[in-house]
Amino acid sequence: MTNESIILKLTAEDTLRLTRILLDEDKVEALLFLKQCLKPQLDQAGRGRLVRSFEAP
């Protein structure tokens, strides 16, 4: 595993949703946010890295 950074992009709506979660300390909504907004981006970033790791040097 490398120490490369991953940049996640949030829409204005996602940012507002995250702010509400943090203010309300809503654990259920926080988990939904992670699954719906961040996990797909992490999966996409991981796919790109898997392809590169199998390429011949």
Image: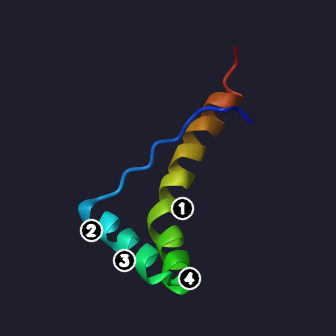
Give the label, 3 or 2, closer to the camera. 3
Q: Residue visible at 56% across and 54% down?
A: 43
In depth, the one of 30 and 45 nearer the eye is 30
Q: Residue visible at 65% across and 38% down?
A: 50
Q: Amino acid at mark 2?
A: Glu
Mark 2–mark 4 Cα distance, whole angstroms, equals: 19 Å
What is the x, y in percent for residue 56?
A: 70, 18
**Which quadrant: the C terminus?**
top right
> Where residue 39 is drawn, which disc sits there?
1
Label located before the other in sequence (3 or 1): 3
Q: Are marks 3 and 2 in contact (CB under 8 Å)?
A: no
- Element type at mark 4: helix
The residue tagged 3 is 20
Q: Residues within 10 Å of mark 1 (few under 14, many from 20)?
A: some
Q: Amino acid at mark 4?
A: Lys
Q: Residues within 10 Å of mark 3 (few under 14, many from 20)?
A: some
Give the label, 3 or 1, closer to the camera. 3
Mark 3–mark 2 Cα distance, whole angstroms, equals: 11 Å
The residue tagged 4 is 27
